[in-house]
Structure formats: C-alpha cells, structure tokens
C-alpha cells in the first residue's frame, strides 16, 4: 500500500443540474462538517426533535411519526413498503417509469402479491383507471410515484386518489423523493398515509437520509401486523422508539448527516414553502421557454410536468453523450440522460432546491446554445 | 412555523470517548464538506474505486467484493446476514452480548432457523465449544462478533474458528464494527468469509457507512441462491454491479459520506495498520493502568480485552449517571454506561481511531480523579 498514490480529490464545484443529488448551500455543508456529536448527546437529541418538527412543516402534516430513515431514498421506499407487507398481501402499484418499477420489485421481495397499473413511460394515470383498478381486488395499499424522475411526470389529483384508495380499504403510499420541498406535498390535506422522500433533491442536503411520515391509518395497520416486518434496519416500530421519547437504541443515527438535514430544513422554513414552490416554478418556466426557443421539445405536457425535473427531447442528429460530456468537461455542468425506453431520447435537467436558481438556468441555456450552435 | 425559533446548534467540540461515534480528524470533516459531486461524476467514480482499494488494505484482503454499504453498522450486519439466508436455512450464532443478540434477531427476520451458542455478557467463546456446536447440525453459516461493544470482549482465534466452520460446511460471518482499523482484522489470513464494519468507530469517519467484504466461498453461496435476497436495498448482487465496472444504477450513494470515508481510509493507510494498532494498544494500556491506580477494576481479563473499548467496573457507591453527566457538562467528555445485564455496573470508555490519543486518556484520567476524588 503506497498511501502517497492517493491525492486530494479534485473539487471543481460542479453545477448540478441532473436528477439529483442537487447542489447544497454552503450553510448546509458547514453544518455537515461540524465536529461529531454522540448520538445520545443532549444536543443531538434536540437536533432529532428539531428535524421531526421541521419535517412536519415540510410535509405539511401533523403526523407524529415523521422522521428521516438512515439511508438514501431507496431505503425510504423500502421502509415504506416492507413495514406494510405481510406474506401474501395483495398490493397495487402504479408503474409509468423507473421508480414505479422499483416499487413493484421491492414489494415482491417481501412476498406481496403485486398487481400493476401500467402506463408507458412519460404518461400519467387518471383517476378513473385508478378507481377501476382498486375495485378489482382487496388491496392492502396502493403505491404511486408523485414525481417520476425517470420521465419528469408529475402525478396530480393525489387527494382524490387517496380518497379512492380509502374507499376500497387500501392505504396510499406515495414516493415524493423528487418533489418534497420543491412542489406542494400536502400530506394531511391529501390524506396520504405513508409518504417518503430523499434528502438530496429539493431539500438540498447531501444524499444519505430519507424523510418518511405516516398517519394514524397507517400506524393502525402497522400495529395489526401478525408477523414482524421482514426488514430489521428499516423496522418503523423500532425506529419510532428510537426517535420518540423512549430513545430506545436501535442503530447509530448518521449524526453529521442529520445535523446537515436540520440546517437544510431550517433553510426551507426560512424561505417558506410557498416562496420555495414559486421559485421552482419560475426557474422551470425560464428553462422551458429557453429550450423551446432553441426548438428543443419537452416530453411532458405542462399540466403533468414536474418543475424540478425536465425531460427535454434530444434534437434529431444530436449526440446525447457528446453533449453531456462537453457540458461537464467544458462548462462544469452536470445533466443526465434518459434510461430504459427513454435512453438516448431525452436529457433530464434538474432544478432542485439550491440548484433551482436563475443564474444556473441562464448558464445552462447559454452553454446549450454554444454546444448545439443554436439561437 | 416560526423559522427563527431554530438557532445554530451548539458545537462544543466534544471529546468522544464512548463506544462510537468517535472523533473525526479535521481533514476528514473538510472532505465531508466538499461541494457535492454527482454519483455518476467521473471524479466520484474514482472515489468509489479508491475506497474499494483502501478498504482492501484495511481489511487485509484481496477480496474483489469490498465496498461500503450505504447505511450504518447495523445495515452492514443486515446485509451480511440477509444475503446468505433463504427461508428455513439453519444458522449458528454466538451470543455473549448485545450485538450477538442482534445477529440472532436479524437472522430470524429472514426466516433462518437460528441456533445459539451462548455465554454470559463479558465472557468469550472457546474453540472447543464452537467445534462442538458446529457439529450438531448442518449450518449455512456461523456468525460471531469480533469486538463486542456492549462488554469490551475481544474474540480471539478467528482463524481456527473459520477453519472449524469450513470443515463443517459453514461460512464464517464476522462483525468487526468496533475493531476494524484499531486491531488486526486479517480477512484473508483468517479465511473469514463475510466481514462487515462501520465507519464511525476505529475508522473515524462519521456514522453512515458500513464497509463489507466477502470472499469467493461466500460469493459462490450467493450465486447458488434459489430465491432473491429478502432485502432490496442491501442486495449484494445488485450493490456489486453498482460498485463494479458495470456501474448499474441501484441507489444513489451517499456521496459526501463516501468522499469523507476515502479521506479517513487514506489517513489509515498513511499511518499504516501496524502503527495504528500499536497506538490503540498503547493508549489502552495507559487507560487501564490509570484506572487500576484509582482502584477501578476492568470487566475483561487482558487476553480478551478490546483495546478500543474498555468496560470499567463502576466502584461501589458511585452514581453512574451523575459521573457521566458531570464528565459531559463540566469536562466536555462523553463516555457511555452499560446496558442490558451490565446497566449501572460498567462504564464503557472508547479509544477509537482519532479519539485514541494520549492527551484524551490523560484528560479523562484527571477528570475522573477530580470527580471521584481519587488518587
């Protein structure tokens, strides 16, 4: 082992305009780098309390159970599913993109009987097909993706969907990994039962934590389990005792990541949700308009278009990878390509959290103009 | 929401001498706070490569599969177990403390038939009882804790234990959460099959990552599975494709935590394992001697005593919690109490990684002398 062969890594200060992670404000990076606190230190316990309160604000909920799971967004998804599945349970999952597929795959791991409502990537569900699907069987839950990062599709009418689920005795589990903190996620008003997210998108904290909230209807289902959840690390009953007044040791929380999350959520609260949503809307409109002026089309129609993730259609004859590489190497900007059926067909441009700023959009549009020799 | 009610948190720079998290060197905190990199950025991909190489050095292994799991030590434990259990598999688990109990509980979640070798907390297993237990049935694996943080007990003779496991057709799974980077963990020389750890103890990186390595014998068992692992986030087959040349997207790695882990491992390599183990030994001996001079006894006999975690017997008549609170409030030092059968009976004093320094030991001993009015 020649330790000298490992140098300091380059830190170019990338302009992150992909599907996440997003850029993180200096104040959050400073909080991340504070000296480590013990996970039972009274200061850290108050950090845990603050996070829960700030997450309730962000999720627009009074749910007592509102905490960050100690893993990335996928761990949040697995926590949301695994705690509500016992072997043989029937569940209904909407699949219109990559993360819908993942919901279905994960639910299968816990031996659910998975029924799917499917739409091609880039389309969205309407309430009638959801109602019809819910009536076909006795489902324990319906799981849907609010903002599908693989396509830029935004699910609308969540309150109606939740009502339909409840009328059929099902919970609604909602993936808001991409949307929380960037667009309205009204957990209580919508009566969504289990809602999870990730730290690294519109909350603009580094990846590594997955906020999750659940309401009374979901907690009753959890309490009625006949078998313990199939997953120990993500067992919400144990996590609840750790984050609640009992402080029963479960696992060591990622302390620095939580201190950073508190700071990121404090920034959300200082800006205010309404102002934050408006900012995401305005920068998105600036991007959409700029792309359209360059004759670059958008995959999603405006009514179902996410503001924080835009799927732009790659113009005919343009080399996807060459453009993205040039953006990174010559302009220090990261965007992403498509994958699955949309590989080579779209660019995915993220304007999430601290990345969602006018200067970043103007920079990207100018860079595109140079590379594509348009406009 | 009155955002102004959330102030900057106090950051007293605690001297962390508990069972983890340990203190983190300034260079690692600086790396942690570097601006975020995308998880597919070529710079981040090289960080992932470096981490694998540096972890191989630290684990003393040539195992190709050597990566950090994206969760805390408990997630590493669950990854190590869940990937090697199919429903009904018989497994053998050594329980002589809290983390042995946890191994048994987790294995049960994945529907293993769990047999236990038990010893009271504070005792260790000998090779003969392990050999006898292994012969009682056809076990898929034997899982043991190398350093039991709840008691300070160090397992010795791991190479012999591994050999006995292999002679009986079982893998050896070893929990080195507390020991890796502080005492010899010789994965290849011992022929341990699956070995996991945590970032926040002797590696002195904040909590949130769990290094894990597995050898060819374990990989063959993994490939021979008839069903997919019960856990998606911790599915080592998928994690392998993400960390390997294929870079198949699985989950978004905690980017900043990984940049910090690289720096922490670089510090391990620069110091060198031998020097690091000697340092842990020397500071431990200074602590042991100082405690004994104050007539404070030690739970473990020297031959099975961890250097990075010392269980000190609380003298009769001394108020456990009052001492620990005074240490924190008046001396800015964190140590921990015991739990389970050892609650109120021991203090757990950690000298892990960057915390394992002479000045910290001298500081703690002087503080103890003041509080206990001894010596």
Image (spheres, coloured by chain):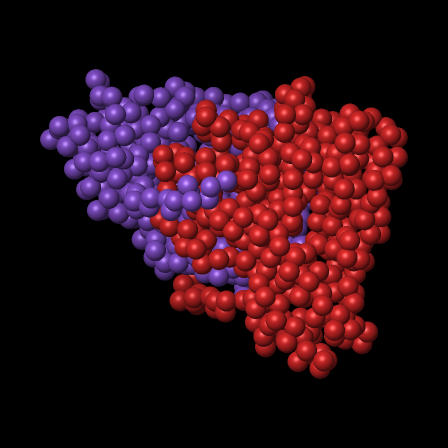
Chain colours: A purple, B red
Q: In which quarter of the image is residue B166?
A: top right
User: Relative to residue A184, is residue B211 drawn left or right?
Assistant: right
> In the displayed image of the protein, which residue is found farthest to the top?
A317
In this rendering, position of residue B125 left or right of residue A288:
right
Q: Position of residue A301 (x, y in %)?
A: 29, 29
Quadrant into which the C terminus of chain B falls? bottom right
Foreground of the two, B65 or A328: B65
In which quarter of the view is residue A375 placed? top left
Residue at the image point whose x is 26% and y is 39% from the top: A332
Is residue A24 in view from this perspective? yes
Q: As rendered, which of A27 and B30 lies closer to the eye?
A: B30
Q: In this view, does B324 lie above or below A291?
A: below
- Residue A269 in view (yes/no): no
Residue A259 at what x, y percent from top left?
48, 57
Q: Residue at x 77, y 31 (%)?
A: B163
Q: Where is residue A302 in the image (x, y as percent from the top left)?
A: 29, 32
Q: In this view, does A342 lie above or below B267?
A: above
Q: Which residue is drawn at 39% across and 19% down?
A: A341
Residue A230 place in picture, x, y as percent: 68, 35
Residue situated in front as seen by the camera: A7 or A233: A7
How many labels sit on residues?
0
Q: Is residue A164 above or below residue B371?
A: above
**Point 57% across, 42% down: residue:** B58
Left or right, B152 with respect to A338, comes to right
User: Quarter of the image containing the N terminus of chain B?
Assistant: bottom left
């Amino acid at each position: 082992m020649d330790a000298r062969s490992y140098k300091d890594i380059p830190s170019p200060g990338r302009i992150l305009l992909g599907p996440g992670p997003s850029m993180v404000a200096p104040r959050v990076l400073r909080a991340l780098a504070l000296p480590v606190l013990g996970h039972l230190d009274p200061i850290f316990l108050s950090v845990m309390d603050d996070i829960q309160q700030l997450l309730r604000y962000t999720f627009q909920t009074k749910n007592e159970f509102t905490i960050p799971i100690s893993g990335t967004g996928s761990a949040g998804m697995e926590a949301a599913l695994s705690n509500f599945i016992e072997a043989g349970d029937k569940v209904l999952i909407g699949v219109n993109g990559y993360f819908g597929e993942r919901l279905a795959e994960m639910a299968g791991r816990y031996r659910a009987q998975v029924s799917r409502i499917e739409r091609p990537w880039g389309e969205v569900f309407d309430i009638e097909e959801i109602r019809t699907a819910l009536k076909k069987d006795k489902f324990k839950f319906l799981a849907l993706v609010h903002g599908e990062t693989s396509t830029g599709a935004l699910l609308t009418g969540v309150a109606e969907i939740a009502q339909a689920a409840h009328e059929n005795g099902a919970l609604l589990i909602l993936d808001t990994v991409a949307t929380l903190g960037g667009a309205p996620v009204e957990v209580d008003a919508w009566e969504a039962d289990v809602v999870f997210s990730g730290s690294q998108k519109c909350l603009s904290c580094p990846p590594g934590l997955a906020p999750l909230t659940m309401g009374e209807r979901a907690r009753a289902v959890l309490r009625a389990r006949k078998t313990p959840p199939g997953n120990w690390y993500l067992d919400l009953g144990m996590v609840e005792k750790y984050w609640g007044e009992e402080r029963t040791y479960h696992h060591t929380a990622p302390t620095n990541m939580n201190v950073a999350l508190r700071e990121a959520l404090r920034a959300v609260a200082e800006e205010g949700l309404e102002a934050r949503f408006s900012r995401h809307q305005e920068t998105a409109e600036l991007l959409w308009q700029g792309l359209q002026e360059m004759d670059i089309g958008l995959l999603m129609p405006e009514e179902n278009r996410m503001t924080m993730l835009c799927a732009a259609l790659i113009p005919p004859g343009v080399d996807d990878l060459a453009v993205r590489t040039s953006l990174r190497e010559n302009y220090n900007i990261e965007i992403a390509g498509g994958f699955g059926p949309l590989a080579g067909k779209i660019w995915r441009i993220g304007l999430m959290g601290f990345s969602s700023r006018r200067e970043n959009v103007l920079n990207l549009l100018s860079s595109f103009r140079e590379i594509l020799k348009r406009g």
